[in-house]
Image (cartoon, helix red, strand yellow):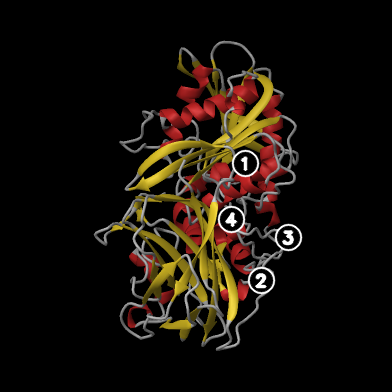
Amino acid sequence: MHFPTQLIQVNEDIILERDVDIPMRDGTLLKADVFRPAKAGRYPVIMNLGPYQKEKVWVTPPDLEEPGNDYMNWETVNPLWWVPKGYIAIRVDGRGSGHSPGQYDPWSLAEAIDFYDAIEWSAQQPWCNGKVGTSGISYYAINQWFVANLRPPSLKAIIPWEGFADIYRDALYHGGILNIFMTNWFTAHLLHHHLGRASRQQPNPWMINVLDRWLQNNLDNGALTGSTADWSRIDVPFYSVGNWTGFGLHLRGNTEAYMVSQNPNRKLRIHSGSHVHAFYTEEGRADQLRFFDHWLKDIDNGIMKEPPVKLAIRHGKDKVVWRHEQEWPLQRTQWTRYYLDLKSTPSSAEGPRQGELAPHIPGGNASCTYPVLTKGSMGSSSAASSQVMGGGIKPDMGISVWTAPMSEDTEITGPLTALLFVSSSSEDMDIFITLRHYDEKGEEILETGQQGSPVPVAKGWLRASHRELDPQKTLPYRPYHRHQRRQYLIPGEIVEVQVEIWPTSMVFAKGHRLRVDIQPRDGLGSAGYMHYHADYNTGTNTIHSGPEYPSHLLLPIIPKG
């Protein structure tokens, strides 16, 4: 189907060129919408490329701070706000989506090459000053990392706003366990952009079997390298923006970017709450504008002289206090081990199994055994039952360990890890860890999550057969698993595992308590980020504690002042 270019006068200040052809190196013409100032001149470009259809109007949430309009598009910059500030906003329909021909291949090297070509094309146009930035949320953040791997000469700044950077570890296989969200996203969220009316102009965009590639490569065997950021190659200035409640998809990518990269022109910001709202707040737009003004317009506004890290320190029930820092993790962190004490924890088939969590090694060895299955989790549909029900398993399945009430306000901000000594009656063992916040009345304090539902403080995952670490990439506070081979358990044999818990921030008020759940399946508050539970995940699992088996959490406690 042919889509001729149209020239539309949006208002007296903005011109829209709809369905502009952007040539790719293989001769394919991708379609783009170009919003530019009506006043002649040379301006920097803000670009995004992806599958969500550039012309599809986004009906904005009623509580979005930035007013909606007929030109708002899901997870992208609002051209009616940016163009009057001297920018050109370009939306590109990725190959095989919207009005662009071809086969769709998400977050691939092929897509990154297309993005590269689109960036370089725009820089050569008479209305561009030769400088291009990229911006956007989620999908439109993720592929910014991958095009930055290729170093387009005209790409001068990127703002990946809540975007994973390693498709295996951040999105598909948390700790080696399949994240059902990704297959659901593909079949439920993405399909409506490609089927129905869209399929008339793009009748066969599915020649590339993406789901098969994702499911076949359940080890990190190199097949997904094109969907992984290479921090040694990303030298473009970046502002990495994460969300504390994005602990099932994006947060790890944003913090890894700042923590691992040696790029001197990098910044990190972490907020909390909804996936899209912060991007459109006045405060959020101001951060983006200052960053782009500096790198795309050469305006010395001081943003790169300020502390490079901006954190929303959480105090519970969505209350946050913004704070600037010089590094991530924070240099003044008091890395504190809190040890599991299971000596008073019953090992029973029914009822809660609760132990203690304290900053000292318990006096004697102990263990707690719990069943992997209960009547409520049995059956052929059990693998995805919690996903369908939208919750997770009941709290008394597994082990819960509690700190004593805090003697003073205590801040935990940074990456976390759990070192556990475990055994199982089976050949493998899935470990789901949840950090929870309880007040002095014993009521859980939840936060508004990335998807809008209530969530706890933090989560981490590991399949025991994936416990092998990469010693070159592992840090004392963040294990890095190879995921290149399976080391199955010998039933009854005790092994050491390190579980990566995604970064968090929370101030526990005096009298409040931290509870840590160790469970065989997704716990309550997992939102849409549930996992497929392997058929062999049956029998019983055991956690060990004590001087011989010093299972513990490493907590990033931030001293006052």
What is the x, y in percent for residue 99? 56, 39
Q: Residue 472 carries which label?
A: 3
Q: Residues within 10 Å of mark 4 (few under 14, many from 20)?
A: some
Q: Where is residue 258 in the image (x, y as percent from the top left)?
A: 62, 44
Q: Which residue is drawn at 54% across and 74% down?
A: 550
Camera-side mark, 2 or 4:
2
Give me the C-alpha separation between circle 2 and circle 4: 36 Å
Quarter residue 445 falls in: bottom left
**Among numbered discs 4 and 1, the one appearing first in the sequence:** 1
The residue labelled by disc 1 is 144
Q: Quadrant of the N terminus?
A: top right
Dot 1 alpha-carbon crowd within 10 angstroms: few under 14, some 14 to 19, many 20 or more? many
Q: Are marks 2 and 4 in contact (CB under 8 Å)?
A: no
Name the secondary structure under disc 2: loop
| Residue under label 2 | 468
Q: Mark 1 to mark 3: distance in Å? A: 26 Å
